[in-house]
Amino acid sequence: MPASMNGAPFPSFLARFALGVLTLWLALMPAPSVAATAETYSFAVVPQFERRRLVEIWKPIVDEVSARTGIELRLVTTFSVSEFERQMSAGVFDFVFTNPYHILVERDRQGYIPLVRGAAPLRGLILVPKDSPVQSVRELDGKTMAVPSVNALGASILIQAELERLYHVHVVLRDVKTHASVYLHVANGLVECGGGVQKVLDEQEPAIRERIRVLYTTRDMPSHPVAAHPRLPKVAREAVRRALLDMQATAEGAALLARVPMRPAVATSMADYLPMADWGLEGYWRDEGGAP
């Protein structure tokens, strides 16, 4: 009969040995990976380019991040910026690459968390056909301006704010759904002017760029971030941030990110975007999400 204390038997030597072996085995097991506990996460990209080109640019990046993290990511594209904004405002997407001002709009709603952005600042541009007689923004009063979305920060909101406050000029917006469509409208003389951003203009075909003239450039602002919904585990958010930054450190990865363009990729946070809250842009934002 084994020894006992207060009537309760001590574990036998064999039981203690088995317990010790089990504890050692558990301690030596590798920690579970992110992928072991994570579902498939969506990675949605605001449609700066037409859909086929967007997939061509972003699919290799998303696949590389998946490979580096062990997290299964699914690239999501939408047909228009407005559709993207509505779904983001509804919290549909897990990861997003999005309009910098939309990050501010959502900070008290969905609360997407900025992770990585391009270090180069974003600048809004007013574009006119190369042979346009227009030489001053004051000549645009009452004219039609093509925009990729009424809520595009550099290509619409900031331009409107600066035109109205600095020059007392009002333009009529025509939403043509994507940045690429803006440049086509301007190059083909379908509108008097268009709103764009330098980083996307640089990615257009030479035949398009040669038929466009930059009339006006806005102030600098922080670039589009990759951001994550706060419902995601912190370990998943940080793994994606680290993967993008590690990609930037390799020639192959930097080349992929340069196509966004995101060059170079740097860590970011909401603090980089908060100064824009004092720019008085809220009057130009149209809430596509339908939230208050």
Image: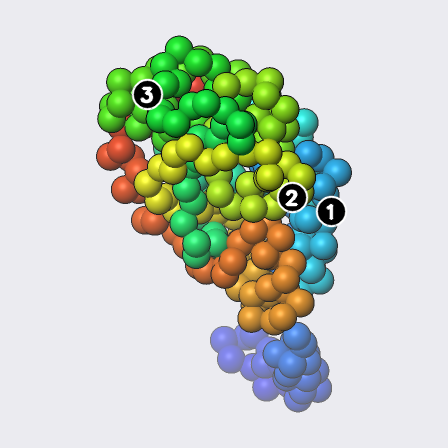
**What whole-number distance in Å separates the C-alpha atoms at marks 2 and 1?**
19 Å
Asked whether the residues under the numbered discs 2 and 1 touch, taking CB atoms below 8 Å apart as contact, a structural biologist would say no
Residue 92 vs 226, above or below: the answer is above
Q: Answer whether residue 146 is visible to the viewer in this image.
A: yes
Q: Amino acid at mark 2?
A: Pro
- Report which residue position mark 3 lands on: 138
Label 1 is placed on what type of residue?
Glu
**Residue 192 location (% of width, % of height):** 50, 19
Q: Quadrant of residue 158?
A: top left
The spot of residue 26 in percent (x, y) is 65, 76
- The residue lying at 59 percent from left, 21 percent from top is 189
The residue that label 2 is drawn on is: 206
Q: Determine which of the numbered discs, if any, sits on residue 274 in the image.
A: none
10 Å crowding of disc 1: few (<14), some (14-19), many (20+): few
- Element assignment for label 2: helix
Q: How many other residues sit within 10 Å of disc 3, few (<14), some (14-19) or many (≥20)?
A: few
| Front residue of this view, candidates 104 and 188 | 188
Quarter of the image with the N terminus is bottom right
- Residue type at the position of mark 3: Arg
Q: Earlier in the sequence, mark 2 or mark 1?
A: 1
* Residue on which disc 1 sits: 56
Question: Of 153 and 202, which appears nearest the observer?
Answer: 202
Number of numbered callouts drawn: 3
Name the residue nearer the viewer: 136 or 48.
136
Q: Which of 246/252 is in front?
A: 252
Asked whether the beta carbons under mark 3 and mark 1 sit within 8 Å of each other, the answer is no
Of circles 3 and 1, the one toward us is: 3
Name which of mark 3 and mark 2 comes first in the sequence: 3
